Amino acid sequence: MSSVVEHFPVLVVVVSLLSAITILIAGWINRKTACYISIATLLGQFIASLFILHHVMTIGPIHYRLGGWGPPWGIEYVMDALNAYVLVILLFLGLVCVIYSKRNIEHELPQKVVAFYTIYQLLITGLCGITVTGDIFNMYVFIEITCLSAYALIASRGKIALKASFTYLVLGSIGACFFLLGIGFLYSVTGSLNIHDLSLLLPPLYGNRVVLAAFVFFIVGLSIKMALFPLHTWLPDAHAFAPSEISAMLSGIIIEVSTYAFIRVAFSVFTVNFIKLLPVFEILSWIAAIAIIVGSVLAITQSNLKRMLAYSSVANMGYIMLAVGLSTSATRYPWSGLTPASMHILNHALMKGCLFLVAGAFIYKGNLWEIKDFQGLGRRMPYTCAAFVIAAISMIGMPPSVGFVSKLYIILASLEAKQFVFVAVLLLSSLLNLVYFWRVIETMYMKVEKGTEHTSHVPRDEIPLSMLIPVLTLSSLCILMGILWLTKIPIPILNRVNVLFGLVGGP
Amino acid sequence: MIGITESVQPLLALLGPALGATLILIFGKRPNVREAWTLLASCFQFLIVLSMVPTILDGKRLVCYLFTMFPGIDFGFHVDAFGLLFALTASSLWIVVSIYSIGYMRALKEHAQTRFYFCFALAILGAVGVALSANLVTMYIFYEILTVSTYPLVAHEQTSEALFAGRKYLAYLLTGGCFLLGSVALTYSISGTTDFRPGGIFTGTMASRSMFIILFILFIIGFMKAAYMPFHSWLPTAMVAPTPVSALLHAVAVVKAGVFGVVRIVSYVYGVDLMQQLGLGVLLAAFAGFTMIVASLFAIAQDNLKRRLAYSTISQLSYIIFGVALLSPMGITGAMIHIPFHGFMKITLFLCAGSILVASGKKNISEMAGIGRAMPITMLAFTVGALGMCGAPPIAGFVSKWYLATGAAQSGQMIFLTLLLIASLLDVVYFYPIIRVAFFEKMPEDEVLKEREAKVELFSEKPQIIETRRPLYYFILVPIAITATISILFCLFPNLFHIHGLAQVAIRDLFKGW
């Protein structure tokens, strides 16, 4: 008997798409409804994604055939442990950001509220689509939906954001083209677009040059999308000038979903056996190691908080890709296979989401962009700043935060792969993180404002509760999730992923 | 076989500062209630730690495992004699420093006192966590909590000098922390466990000799908190912090956590036998000997009292590293008991320095002429602490130095004994001038005149007692008197708080049948 949960993958996408249209129509009548419809939809989607995860973990993968057409002809939605897990993360952060956005968007884009939520919901549709689909061409379509909505959202602040958005548009389109070319090449030799079908058809063709070229196209295309160094140039401006909740989504989810797409292509379309034929992952991990260092060094040179966080995201994508690169050589439980990489996808979403929302709070309260203007904020906005400190400490990798767990897992994986250089890179990176985050913390708490040296009482000037709660939720999760990871309660989900992809693992 | 008992006592011991910190934050607006919580939490913690002593003295262990982090690594606590020794030191000194802070912080009308007490409680949480940890990973977690929570204390004054000190503090200690994390991970990948075991955990592991040596060096860099030379300069710089913070850094928690870690590595991770095989003992002893001598020479040159004490700490910490590097039962006993003994003596000295600052506003030794007569109790306590540092009986320092000297003799390396004696001599060289200036030099004439103008009615030859002039002086003088008295009692009764007994138990575990 099929359970109702088996229909959720398609519902998550369709409901989101319909809600975008509903927002447009309802917003026409009453602008205030837009935000509430978006919150309600995302809440429903989030709950649905939890059901999906539960179903996948207890019963098994869900296969949903759109229109009843069986693969390889029809489009199939497949939910396994990996995408169920990513879906939960993305909808959670989407929900948190939309709650935060209510007051912030009213403040920043009062004329564009309806358009904002319509496009936001389209963005969520695209992200959910990339995650749930089991068809590679369908994935391309959703990547385009995601990116087009992202371009629009980044540009929504106007002025310099237009330029940032245009750069992203150009580079993002090139990336999408590469991805499409990869699909075309594969289609020309196999005649199939279904991911599972491709994985069955490809093994005899592994030596084929067309297949190799396709793989390279996928790597390059997705590297642009995930802003892997040296293809990260679009990211800092886009992150810096977008509204803050969009920055949080961009950094916490959109580039992460691109890494998900990469993992899916590498392990589901191609397989571990193919990857082991080529030294691709080795090269990838070296590039990622460079990305970690370069991203952190560039972050140190920034004076604008959001740009600094953006470069930090470049470094963090390096973390994820380094972990992906090590996934074929690390086999010992619990840091086997993709566990560190998938773990950091969640961890980075929490940390960076929180940091960008805090940066948005400073902009909301006093239009503060530059780090040097943050003097005395620690006393004026105690809760927001405390959240920042927790998230920053987590980025540095202090125990028992999520950043620490990621760092420890990746270190253990690199030690198992006998790559001592990566251990050094990771440790150095946490010191570099310390340099640029501590500068902010020091300014917020320790530098004394002129004129207030002798006043013991500073009036509080906190952001509204509807913005504060998302910030505090994310920051407390930075610690709680870290402890949860250490207790290894969520590890079985990730281990399921390793088993799925044939990476050795298991307790 | 060692009896192992499950117990929640270690967890309760950490609950004290954790709850205390929360309550301090909640009652931040009401200073009296806030300080009451600090005192309650410290007393509670001390009693819990003390209650674990009898079980340990029976040769049993207390364990409390919470969850498994990695195969072979549980997050949890494993109380043995040596860990308890450090926990006792930290928790007993916390009470004293808390009382003192009330007097000191209020007398100087310091700002951000809630932050101060909050971070102080967290730092104690870190220190006791380090002491009771069952393995390196747990220890690393608390070690880093200690580092981060101490930063706001070091940079407390928020002047540019204090900010610089804070930055330097973090730069040194978190770099150390990175090395520590790397070496912990490496240890785990070599041996599959990071538990502390008296015989070491590397027996029967496949790793080359050079690997062990590199790992050891990484570990030593990791424990940069031990402030050995040449990585010591964060400690004197951190002297800009208020005196209770200096006490925390030097006596209660921070540097002690560093040397505690070194002792743990040498005797519980590597094990005495492996250390001897690799010849690392001699290397470490030479290294520590260098710091002992050079830091003392630096101390002679300082005029700022707190800076001189800071260099004295650097030198004294190396005594502990030196003792454990001797790899002999006597040497390690000396190292272990020097942790609490040095703690009590050094805290006395720092509290005295703070008391002088509060009462007279003087920081430099050259300005302190005749202060012994103006502040008799303070300077008497100071003399006790200073003599103890030099190793003169009947003060605690004598006992630990006696053990260290015997250990050096036991090791058969006469050069080590010589080093130790030279270092002791240098201790005298830099402490004696302070006492001489304080007691045997007269206050400069103009200052005497000023004093007299201030209080015309006391126009007599009798010197003025200035230490009781401030409000809340009891809170400052009583802790000083307590620590000085205990420093003396430690020599007469080394088994006070079972310090000696615990060290004996630890040594019995390390050297079976000794």
Image (cartoon, coloured by chain):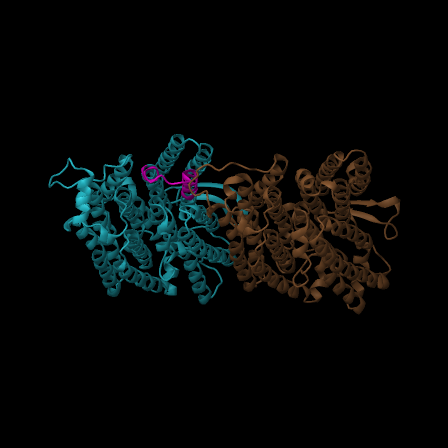
To which quarter of the image does residue B449 belong?
A: top left
The number of discs equals 0
Q: Position of residue B124 (x, y in %)?
A: 40, 42
Q: What is the quadrant of the N terminus of chain A in the image?
A: top right
In this view, which residue lies farthest toward the left? B461
> Would residue A153 be counted in the magenta stretch?
no
Above/below status of B248 relative to B433: above
Main structural element of the magenta stretch: helix, strand or loop?
Answer: helix
Residue A263, position as x, y percentages in the image = 71, 55
Left or right: residue A36 compared with residue B74:
right
Residue at the image point whose x is 29% and y is 36% from the top: B475
The answer to whether residue B261 is seen in the rendering is yes
Chain B shade: cyan
Which colour denotes chain A? Answer: brown
Q: Which residues are magenta?
A: B103-124
Residue B199 can be seen in this image: no
* Whole-percent x, y for residue A5 in the image: 77, 38
Queried whether the magenta region covers residue B107, the answer comes back as: yes
Q: Nearer the viewer, residue B481 or B415?
A: B481
Foreground pick, A427 / A471: A471
Q: Where residue A115 sits in the image (x, y, percent)?
A: 77, 43
